[in-house]
Amino acid sequence: MVIAVDVFGGDNAPQAILEGSVRALAQNGEMQLILFGDAKAIEAYMAAYPQYASRVSVRHAPDYISSHEQPTYAVKHKPDSSLVGALRCVADREAQCMISAGSTGAVLAGATLIVRRLKGVKRPALAPIMPTRHGCVLLVDCGANVDCKPSYLPQFGVMGSAFMQHVYGIEQPRVGLLNNGAEAEKGNELTKAAYPLMEKAPFRFAGNCEGRDVLSGEFDVVVSDGFSGNMILKNTEGTAMLMVKMLKDELMADTRSKLGALFAKPAFKRLQARMDYTEYGGAPLLGINGGIIKAHGSSDAKAFSAAMRQAAAYVKGGVTEAIGTAIAQMGDDGGE
């Protein structure tokens, strides 16, 4: 299991990336890493962990891509960046998966240009995992494809279903189509045209999913165009942060509330853990001919190690191969 790491991508790079990588090595004895970035800085950090020397390779990449750069231009004009190096490692089959907390746009552009799509995949999709009451749900897509054609959405469902089967062990994932109503005739032109295609697709189609039901636990995969999916994701993050702040304000409002909060502290900690994005790792980019995991840009060591665990699960589950097989079996409807 070989994973390539963009050490200099992300708000807290390289410290958090290296610390998270060391945590992941300690947790998974099968994992081997190829670390891309300033070799001197990486080797200086890793010198404190000689027990992992045989499982870590360092590749010097003197440049890096920031979140302020135009993604496609940066990928094409910075071949010596840590991100491009990690992507090429997957494209050349030296690694089965790569992970980066760097620019989302650059990861998407680089994955498409360098690693390329699986045969038959019309568009790759970014798929974050979100918590539900009794598990989690995969949101496909959350921003890779702002404008979609109806034929993209059934493929998103196929890819998401394959991921949940092979990583989370769900035998028949329930796939929903994000819409403004549960009825089949509801929606805009895109969802109305996509609905019958979803019904015919080779997965367990559970019908339309309204925005309020994304986290209900009634769906294992929710399919959306990238614009709507990103709105759902960001709104959910904002609502969760607001609720936590409001709850804290109320619990600290008077002596009685403070006393109650003291007794309820263990429950609040468990709830916080369930809602914490650092527990869920990064978002896989599905449909690429190799594993691509996009970690949160503000990842600390804990979040990055979680993303590394997800990368390991992606490789162990054979997700790339499973998606390739599912797309091939799905066939082509003749349209882009």
Image: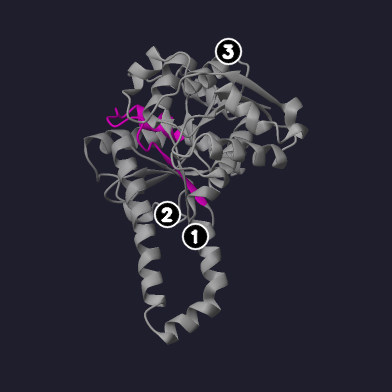
Where residue 332 appears, x then y in whole percent?
Answer: 41, 19
Q: Which residue is mark 1?
A: 133
> What amino acid type is highlighted by mark number 1?
Arg
Measured in 3D between alpha carbons, the distance from the residue under mark 1 to the one under mark 2, in whole angstroms, is 7 Å
Nearer to us in this view, 118 or 2: 2
Measured in 3D between alpha carbons, the distance from the residue under mark 2 to the one under mark 3, in whole angstroms, is 38 Å
Measured in 3D between alpha carbons, the distance from the residue under mark 1 to the one under mark 3, in whole angstroms, is 41 Å
Where residue 42 appears, x then y in whole percent?
Answer: 60, 28
Q: How is the image coloured?
A: one colour
> Could you tell me which residue is drawn at 39 percent across and 28 percent down?
66
Q: Which mark is residue 215?
A: 2
Please say if 49 is above or below 237. Answer: above
Residue range (magenta)? 136-157
Question: 251 left or right of 321?
Answer: left
> What amino acid type is highlighted by mark number 2?
Leu
Q: Find out whether the residues at labels 1 and 2 contact each other: C-beta distance under 8 Å.
A: yes
Quarter assignment of residue 192: top left
Query: Is 154 colored magenta in this rendering?
Result: yes
Label 2 vs 3, first from the N-terminus: 3
Question: 8 left or right of 244?
Answer: right
Please say if 252 is above or below 245. Answer: below
Query: Is 267 colored magenta in this rendering?
Result: no
Label 1 vs 3, first from the N-terminus: 3
Please say if 177 is above or below 216. Answer: above
Question: 34 left or right of 279?
Answer: right
Q: Residues within 10 Å of mark 3 (few under 14, many from 20)?
A: few
Q: Which residue is mark 3?
A: 92
- Residue 317 seen anywhere in this rendered image of the structure: no
Label 1 vs 2, first from the N-terminus: 1
